[in-house]
Amino acid sequence: MAIAVSKLYRNCASLYQMQLLAGHKGLGNLVEWVHIVEDQEVSSFLHGHELIFIAGYMYRDDGWLLNFTKELYKSGTSAFVINLGPYIKSVPKEVVDFCNEVDMPLFTIPWKIRLVDVTRDFCTRIMHNESVEASVASTIKDIIFKVGDIETQIQHMERNGYKRDCHLCFVNMSIHSVDEQYNSENMEKLRLFVEQIARTSQRMFISFTYQANLVVVLSESDMYNVRKFVEELMNLIRKKKDSFSINMGVSSIMQGLMNQDINFEKAIAANEMAEKRKVRVTYYDELDIYKVLLAVKDKKVLKEFYHEVFGRLEQYDAENGTDLMGFLRSYLDNNGSPQLVSEQQFIHRNTVNNQLKKIEKITGYNLLNLEEKVRCSIGYMIQDLIT
């Protein structure tokens, strides 16, 4: 977990007389830790997402400070604080311009403020923020999986800003790396992307991992804001050009902490559909009849229905090396129009009719009968779920 630069600044600006000089657009950057760095050679050992303080003990000239600032930016520094005093009396315009150019927040504090006090306070705030968020994430998981006393858990959520009747939406994200050995590293990147977007817009959110997926819980009252969050996340991933992609399943917006186990399952189901359909995002509320099928707890019922509908046709394909299953699906997807199938598959219309007759003979179905076409369509929807 991390904390936004804006939150640290908002809470500490007057206490430490912090002045924001540049990089206003980067206030949403996340800070995972704080360091005092005086030598630009040390910057190569930074992990990124740090807030850096400098008093300027090794300050030589304006060019040195600009190069130092550039090295911090290359290292992924989230924000930069200069302790003005006997070593650095003012901030050069070139440094201000650079920080504005790269959206890296640049602050100053007066010499009378002791850096050890500021850094200790900031680190304490970061650790407290991390502790609270971990506790809330653990509690929402206990609510979802029905572990422990629900009333105690709800009271804990209320103490941390989540009302008993709050509206929550779950987003389940599965990650796919070009190289699977980097999955854990990319998961951490994804988590930081999520935090950056959520904190920049001051959204209340919870995140935790579940079965190698990242689950984000948004406290929203309308789907517009949920869609905006999803869109911003996808845009950020594209902008960063990282070597991974994600599929997202988005649940409904459901009111009340006690009912969120159902909503969580909706996000899981929507994510599975996104992966099967090979689309980036699937919203549970847009799954139409799939929602009815997903609600069937006994999957044996679905499998039995599927084999009743397509068992003979699948067997024929397997024995004869044909793809009548695919042909029938194309026919149904084209609203039962032989002409559209003919155009799509570049075959003569008579060939289409002959294939349809063959399917009718194998299955015993009348493909002009609406009820039997619906039966087959449902069968293909079940195929999407069980294969």
Image (cartoon, rainbow, N blue to C red):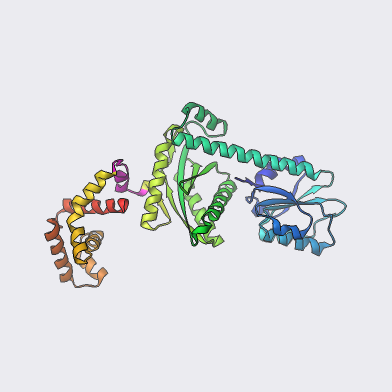
Quadrant location of the C terminus in the rendered image: bottom left
**Do we see residue 283 in this rendering?**
no
Q: What range of the chain is rendered magenta?
A: 286-298
**Left or right of 134 in this view: 15:** right
Looking at the image, residue 174 lies above or below residue 316: above
Q: Residue at x 19, y 63 (%)?
A: 319
Residue drawn at the location 48% of the way across and 26% of the way down: 151
292 is higher (above) or lower (below) than 246: above
Q: Is residue 204 magenta?
A: no
The answer to which image quadrant residue 203 occupies is top right
Q: Residue furthest right?
A: 86
Residue 197 locus on image (x, y percent): 56, 50
Q: Position of residue 231 (x, y in %)?
A: 49, 54
Q: Is residue 191 left or right of residue 296?
A: right
Residue 338 position in % (x across, y down): 19, 65
Residue 295 drawn in magenta: yes
Total of numbered circles in the picture? Answer: 0
Q: Nearer the viewer, residue 155 or 168?
A: 155
Tell me what residue is drawn at x 65 percent, y 43 percent.
7
The foreground one among 274 and 213 is 213
